[in-house]
Amino acid sequence: MKLAIGNDHVAIEMKNEIVEHLREKGHTIIDVGTNSSDRFDYPVSGFKVACMVKSGEVDGGILICGTGVGISIAANKVKGIRACVCSEPFSAKMSKEHNNTNVLAFGSRVIGIEMAKMIVDEWLNAKYEGGRHQKRLDMIARIEETGDLG
Ligand code: RB5
């Protein structure tokens, strides 16, 4: 798969290890940074990755900040993005199967690198199930589109 990855200044080391892990598995990775330890505002990388996913330039996005929270909130402001924060593999897998998440986020201050690799692998191996779940995703899209459920 072709994936975009982004992070802030507290997640550089974890980002680099995840990039290496994914490249070893044969994925093509576009690293939008940051790669500087200077303080970096996570909405920048959240937005960049989200735009690449939205445009179809990549098949999915991975975002890492201290908690995964701020960077996922930023990504979710881009229309069509369904980003989730996961601290364990079960939610990561379910988020793809039921919610068709197109961006995965986690926190370098929350989980260790082996858990992060497991979460990423589960998410990438899972498939969206469609069916009854699509109606709910359509409802979310309607909220995004109209600000209402109607
Ligand atoms: C940076 O200090 C921290 O706020 C950021 O990495 C993230 O945890 C925000 O949600």
Image (cartoon, rainbow, N blue to C red):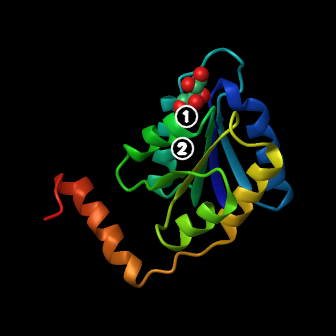
Real-space Cα separation, disc 2 to disc 1, in angstroms: 6 Å
Asked whether the residues under the numbered discs 2 and 1 touch, taking CB atoms below 8 Å apart as contact, a structural biologist would say yes
Q: Nearer the viewer, residue 79 or 89?
A: 89
Vertical placement of 149 versus 71: above or below? below
Vertical placement of 65 versus 37: above or below? below
Q: Position of residue 91 (x, y in %)?
A: 59, 62
* Badge 2 residue CB within 8 Å of ligand 1: no
**64 with respect to 116 (left or right):** left
Residue 84's disc is none
Q: Mark 1: few, some, or many residues within 10 Å (few <14, many ≥20)?
A: many
Q: Which residue is mark 1?
A: 45
Q: Position of residue 146 (x, y in %)?
A: 17, 55
Q: Secondary structure at mark 1?
A: helix
In which image quadrant can residue 121 be found? bottom right
Q: Position of residue 98 (x, y in %)?
A: 48, 72
Quadrant where the image shows the C terminus: bottom left
Q: Secondary structure at mark 2?
A: helix
Residue plotted at (86% across, 56% down):
24
**101 with respect to 26 (left or right):** left
Q: Which residue is mark 2?
A: 49
Q: Residue furthest top?
A: 38
Q: In the rendered structure, which amino acid carries the disc numbered 1?
A: Ser
Q: Nearer the viewer, residue 90 or 150?
A: 90
